[in-house]
């Protein structure tokens, strides 16, 4: 009985043609950060500026509805 109830509760996430939004996939407060090493869709890669490196990070905070791209400079 328990297995069948578990399968019914999780069946919704197994529908392959459905377009899921963040509320379908993630419950509760979530923070996600990604720093690019190479250029991609979310961030630029690491740039060598001579004596420094420029690094780009994508940050998302679900509950506060924050989507930011942050650029930082680091000394070599």
Image (cartoon, rainbow, N blue to C red):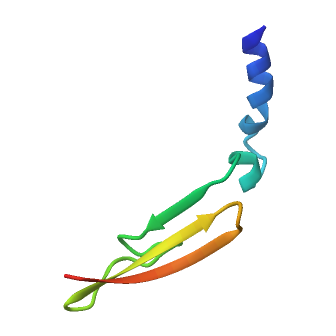
Q: Quadrant of the N terminus?
A: top right
Q: Looking at the image, which residue is at 63% across and 72% down?
A: 67
Tell me if I can see residue 27 in this picture: yes
In the rendered structure, the answer to whether residue 47 lies left or right of residue 17 reads left
Is residue 44 depicted above or below 30 in this figure? below
Q: Residue furthest bottom?
A: 50
Instruction: Name, please, the residue furthest toward the top.
Output: 1
- Classify 29 as above or below 68: above
Q: Residue at x 74, y 30 (%)?
A: 10
> Picture quarter containing residue 36?
bottom left
Q: Would residue 20 be visible to someone looking at this image? A: no
Residue drawn at (19%, 90%) of the image = 51
Of the 4 image quadrants, the one containing the C terminus is bottom left
Q: Position of residue 73 (x, y in %)?
A: 34, 85
How many labels sit on residues? 0
Residue 65 placement (x, y as % from top left): 71, 68
Looking at the rendering, which quadrant does residue 38 occupy?
A: bottom left
Does residue 25 sit above or below 76 in this rendering?
above
| Residue 16 picture location, percent across and down | 72, 42
Q: Residue at x 80, y 24 (%)?
A: 8
């Amino acid at each position: 009985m328990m297995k069948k109830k578990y399968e019914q509760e999780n069946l919704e996430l197994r529908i392959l043609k459905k377009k899921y939004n963040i509320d379908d996939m993630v419950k509760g407060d979530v923070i996600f950060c990604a720093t690019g090493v190479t250029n991609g869709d979310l961030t630029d890669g690491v740039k060598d500026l001579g004596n420094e490196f420029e690094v780009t990070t994508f940050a998302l905070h679900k509950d506060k509805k924050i989507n930011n791209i942050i650029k930082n400079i680091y000394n070599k």
